[in-house]
Amino acid sequence: MTTPKWWKEAVGYQIWPASFKDSNGDGFGDIPGIISTLDYIRDLGVDFIWLSPMYDSPQHDWGYDISNYEAVWPKYGTMHDMDMLITECHTRGIKLLLDLVVNHTSNEHAWFRESASSRTNSKADWYIWRDPKFVDGKRVPPNNWRSQFGGPAWTYVSARDQYYLHICLSQQPDLNWENQETREAIYESSMRFWLRKGVDGFRVDIVNCYSKDQTFRDTPVVEPGQPTQPMENSLFRNGPRMHEWLREQRSLAFDPFGEDIVLVGELTGTGAEETLLYTSSKHRELDMIFDFDFSMSGSGPNLSPHQWGPAKLTDFKAGFEKAQGFLKDRDMDAWTSVFAENHDSPRSVSKYGNDGPEFWAKSAKLLSMLLCSLSGTLFLYQGQEFGMTSLPKDYPLEDMRDGPWINYIQSALAEKPGNEEHVKKVQHAFWNMGRDNNRTPVQWDDSLPSAGFSMTEPWIKVNESFTKINAKSQIGVEGSVLEFWKKSIAIRKSEEWKQVFVYGDFELVNPSNEKTFTFWKRTAARTVLVALNFSDEEQRIYIPSGFNLDNSRLLLSNYSDSGVKDHVLRPWEGNFYIVQ
């Protein structure tokens, strides 16, 4: 039996503050705007909010470059506003998680400014500094690593005559976790400061990247002739001291605030066995992680986004099967999360469903059925609950706001100027992966100028779908995507069904089918067959051996006239069949 914790049966809701709700008419979402929507969030069935970075920041990477962990970006509000948000959430029975970004800071953080000033100051070793190499008398970076956002992973500082490491942007220098004094400062400023204010936990950004291979050797050359190369996973992920540091962090920073503080890690490039070391309750490192394998279909080692192959439902299913598998090892007592969207991904109904007018609602409801039937802690992203869609594939470059993606698109288009087929591939890459897709303002209603998000033009254009897809048009409307989500969540959390849907064993059936996603959810007392059609055509229901569909009972469907007598799933139809 899994160890009881409040967050296992809870439903989380991610808020990306810039695009959620603007209260003062400056075109940016803010904390008072969030407070004004808390009743709406509670009524969805949400138990906790994950708030993306609201800290003070120069915003080179939308708040993931933090210049002060103990201050709020003025566009979002004040520290008083944050105190009010914590209070108002707790008054409604909603817990609050913040984003913990401690692999790196901003290069405008006071720690880095001091560290960069000389080799002898008190924070000289708080970041990762290395001496230059010289090739043919020319100064070059210490190795050939390429940052995750392109370009060298090292930037030169003349005051030290050294380079600092940044696996992300040059404005995001990596902290030196090897230094005990640095770790203690991180614990105090980014964690204890907010726990004392009453936050209930953290989502942890790129949590497996703190410990690097200390040889800082060159990464293998996979692109001959290029000055930098994609970093090999083993050089910067899941390093030799990761588990040691996370256990230390739990003991020193979190345990003094009780056992209910939850940590949800962003964990990429990590196999199942290694993941269990992070999430086992016995190891006391993380409580669960976000595993992204389901979203990586078509990708390959060192492929640029426009080089990805077509996505396959079989890969999508295998990704969820992996994440569900974390719960099978009873001895490890690990946990998992369930999600399909976040601030770094496109809209799920566009990527995994069909966002055309004929099947938009059906496929949005189908995805809610999938997520609400999987074991683990369920997360929604703002606007997902009423079916917000991605931007058009031909969305103009001048309207984009995500700097790293703008740079990528410009670079990719320059490879084959004027080639229409290449342009289409790059456009598809943006639609398939571009972060602006999920960062347009939440469409609260169909009003101008910004769909109820603000009283003025917002920092990024509203998706033109707002006239037909918005929260106001769906609240209280029977059969709407929003009300279907509420119904699905209510079933999932009910005393009658939570053991099956939150904790039950998952067994994938017919895994090679590229049109349907079918699986069992089981406990000792209950068995449910989940049958989902991920296509625009009718599909035969896969009936596992020994199961008589005609003797089952229908628990939930996204078609109003479904019945167990039918052995065919209509386009984007989903059904939960109870085994009698």
Image: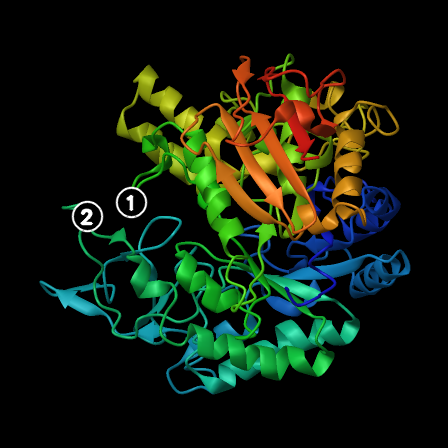
- In the foreground, 198 or 258: 258
Residue 16 visible in the snapshot: no
The quarter holding residue 211 reads bottom left
Q: Is residue 490 visible?
A: yes
Residue placed at 88% from the left, 28% from the top? 476
* In the rendered image, the vertical position of residue 139 relative to residue 354, given as above or below: below
What is the x, y in percent for residue 503? Answer: 65, 53
| Foreground disc of the pair 2, 1 | 1
Number of other residues with Cα within 10 Å of mark 2, as a class: few under 14, some 14 to 19, many 20 or more:
few
Front residue of 353 and 237:
353
Q: Residue furthest front?
A: 546
Residue 500: x, y in percent? 68, 47
Residue type, numbered disc 1: Pro
Q: Find residue 468 and report its horizontal and vertical position in percent.
A: 74, 18
Task: Classify residue 129 as left or right of residue 443.
Answer: left
Q: Label 1 near label 2: C-beta < 8 Å? A: yes
In the drawing, what numbered circle is on residue 301?
A: 1
Left or right of residue 139, residue 68 in this image = right
In the rendered image, the vertical position of residue 333 relative to residue 496, given as above or below? below
Question: What secondary structure is found at the residue carrying circle 1?
Answer: loop
281 to 304, vertically: above or below:
below
- The residue beneath circle 2 is 222
Amino acid of disc 2:
Val
Give the quarter of the figure containing the N terminus. Answer: bottom right
| Image coordinates for residue 376, horizontal then vertical, percent | 62, 52
Residue at 60 percent across and 37 percent down: it is: 438
Residue found at x 47% / y 31%:
432
Residue at the spot 60% in from the left edge and 65% down from the top edge: 287
Name above or below for residue 295 compared with residue 533: below
